[in-house]
Amino acid sequence: MKNGISLCMIVKNEKNRIAGCIEPIFDLLDQIVIVDDYSEDGTPDLLRKRFGIEVIRKRTGRINRLCDLRNTAFDIANTPWTLSLDADERMEPEVLEAFLHADHEARISGYFGPWMNYHARDEPFEDYKLFIFRKGYRMRGIIHENVQMDIRLRSQRAEWLDYLRVTHYPEERKKIERIALRRRRLAYAIRLEPTWYRYHWFLGLLELMAGNRDRALWAFSTIAHANSLQFPVECLNSYMALAEMLARSGFSSELDQELDAALAFHERVADDFEVEVNFRLKPWLRQARKDCTAGRFDAIRIYRFAW
């Protein structure tokens, strides 16, 4: 094969799910590096007995920086490419095999693909995620960490691969617990890094899900009006969320202003690689502008996001 690849994962108490992630692609991987946050359910034993994998045990620490664990795995990996998956994600072997046999331009540092989310009681929906990237890149952020920020800060690019499809099966019974926990962690992260605006976007989403509209409005307004070139997609997402909230409240003049500001900012960041990948953004903003002009406020609804 033309491209060697390592699977890098962090796990904690994933005994019942992790084999389903690794097994389908096991024979295609050159290396598997798993950092275990001191599982108590026998996850390391299962990995050793079933796959011959010896995990690296490391705790997240007081502020629970998962990126530190992920970066530990990335540093150990010694192949040209890294595949980053969670235990509740699945990639078909045909997908990985296609990537490994393909030619990849040297100027491209990573690849996004469709991320299909299957929640137990909801219709599945598609988002996107950066799954594969070159060695040397790192996760950034205390929570909701990602690699594309590192790529952006190095003035490099990532691109979209339509076939790079991964399915996501989150554990539904933990959903309410996770919302409360993540809200607390995001609020703490904002206190530590107030201009890392990705935190505001996800906090706004979770506050909205919890019914805290005033807190959600503060979070979305903070990031949207920052017009941050480091977080262009999060800013545009927040403009969309603000637009829906204003439309539901019937504030037409404020809605006009926010949509105009969002479209102007989109033009400013249109060449950003992640803005290009998020192809739903511009059509949504344009349609929302038309709906606003026509007074169709009920039609202004944001699409679903994975969190």
Image (cartoon, rainbow, N blue to C red):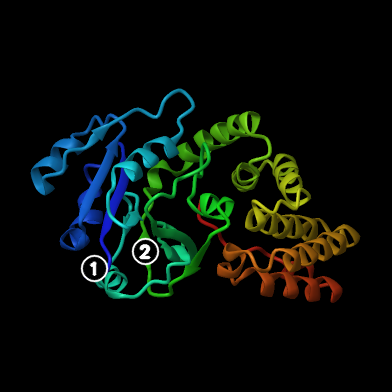
Tell me: 48 left or right of 13: left
Q: Extreme right residue here?
A: 253
- Measuring from the top left, give residue 75's x and y in whole percent: 34, 42
Mark 1 burial class by Cα count in 10 Å: few <14, some 14-19, many 20+: some
Q: Which mark is residue 131?
A: none
* Picture quadrant where residue 24 is located: bottom left
- Measuring from the top left, give residue 32's x and y in whole percent: 23, 49
Q: Is residue 111 above or below residue 41?
A: below
Q: Nearer the viewer, residue 196 or 301?
A: 196
**Residue position marked by numbered label 1 in the rendering:** 93
Q: Residue at x 78, y 50 (%)?
A: 225
Quadrant position of the N terminus in the picture: bottom left
Query: Can residue 124 be seen at all in this image of the molecule?
Result: no
Q: Nearer the viewer, residue 135 or 292?
A: 135
- Measuring from the top left, give residue 126's x and y in whole percent: 48, 66
Q: Residue at x 57, y 63 (%)?
A: 274
Q: Amino acid at mark 2?
A: Val
Q: Extreme front residue here?
A: 106
Mark 2 burial class by Cα count in 10 Å: few <14, some 14-19, many 20+: many
* Number of numbered labels in the structure image: 2
Q: Extreme left residue here?
A: 49
Asked which secondary structure carries label 1, the reply is helix
Q: Residue at x 25, y 34 (%)?
A: 56
Q: Is tag 2's residue or tag 1's residue first in the polypeptide sequence?
A: 1
* Picture quadrant where residue 219 is located: top right
